[in-house]
Structure formats: C-alpha cells, structure tokens
Amino acid sequence: MNIRYQVASAVDLPFEDGAFDFATAFMSLMDVPETERTLEEAFRILKPGGFLQFSISHPCFSTSHRKNLRDADGKTYAIEVGDYFRNPDGEIEEWIFGAAPVHLKSKFPKFKVPRFTRTLSEWINTIIRTGFVLEQINEPQPDDETVRQYPYIQDSQVVAYFLHIRCRKG
C-alpha cells in the first residue's frame, strides 16, 4: 500500500469533498485557532458515514492555572485548576516533557506553543453544529501497573490529561 504525505492547512485541506472514509487528528486541534473551520473541513472531506477521530488536551484540566496537590509522599491527590473560561487566544506557552531526562532538558529549548483553549461545551457544540454525530468520548487513564512502571504519570489517575472523541458524518 502506498502512502502519500502532504502538508496542508487544517482550515483549507487540498482534498475533494467526500474523499475519505475517516480522518484523524492526534493532539493537534486544540492548537488551531479556527476550531469550527477545521471541523468543517474534516466534515467536508469525509464520505457520508465516514468518521473523524481525534484527541485533544482535556479542556477541563488543561487550564492556564493548574497545580498538582501532593501528600507527604509526593503522590498527587487532587489537581487545582483555574481560569477554565478564559481563552488565552494565542498566548505562547513554553514547556518541555516532564519525563525527559535532565541532561536532555538542559540541552534542548522548550517548545513554544500558542494556546487556544475551548471549554468542553464549546467543543461538543461545535462538533454538533458542524453536522457530526457524537459516537464516543473517552478520558483515558493509566492502570496501577503502568503507574508502577512510570510513576511520573500518577497524577493522570486523578484527572484526565486527554479527551478522545469519535464523531460520524451522517
């Protein structure tokens, strides 16, 4: 099977109407300012009955203010969040993977990513308004064995980091 890769704007895809059975976006749509236009483009390129499956940072817990509350052993027992309704509208956030080894953290610059947050209701209502039918929503969390192997992800047993959505074109 041949795969052809193309670079294109999410708001102006270079494909014909109804060209695909499915489309996917992995951890990217939350970084696009034109959320509705992006979903409209995905809808346009799908065949009737086709689906879009995507993942985003969980809007309830990826807020401008987020703080892990830890017990005496360093285990997260709650997450403090704030500014849920504030859309930073392109403010630049700088970060590096928390699990990266220290020698690599000091060697590479932080990522610079613009933030365009949407509330959970904004996401769901935009999906519906675009014409999609919601099929499934998931909030993945690691099991205890995974946390034993990777203790730095323990806080993702307290709240969801990600939201996975599958919706279908009717």
Image (tube, rainbow, N blue to C red):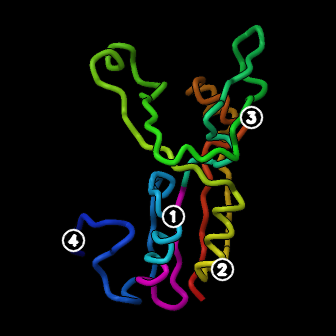
What amino acid is at disc 2?
Answer: Val
Quadrant assignment for the C terminus:
bottom right
What amino acid is at disc 3?
Answer: Val
Indicate the position of residue 98 as horizontal and vertical percent values.
Answer: 48, 25
What amino acid is at disc 4?
Answer: Arg
Q: Of discs 3 and 1, which sits in the foreground?
A: 1
**Residue corresponding to mark 1:** 35
Q: Quadrant of residue 41?
A: bottom left
Asked whether, in this view, residue 32 is left or right of residue 59, the answer is left
Foreground residue among 110 and 33: 33
Crowdedness near tag 4: few (<14), some (14–19) or many (≥20) residues, C-alpha within 10 Å: few
Q: Of discs 4 and 1, which sits in the foreground?
A: 1
What amino acid is at disc 1?
Answer: Thr
What residue range appears in magenta? 43-55
Predominant secondary structure in magenta? strand
Residue 49 counted in the magenta span:
yes
**Which residue is at a point 46% across and 89% down the rendered structure image?**
47
Indicate the position of residue 78 as horizontal and vertical percent values.
Answer: 77, 28
What is the C-alpha distance between the residues marked 3 and 1?
28 Å
Asked whether, in this view, residue 93 is left or right of residue 13, the answer is right
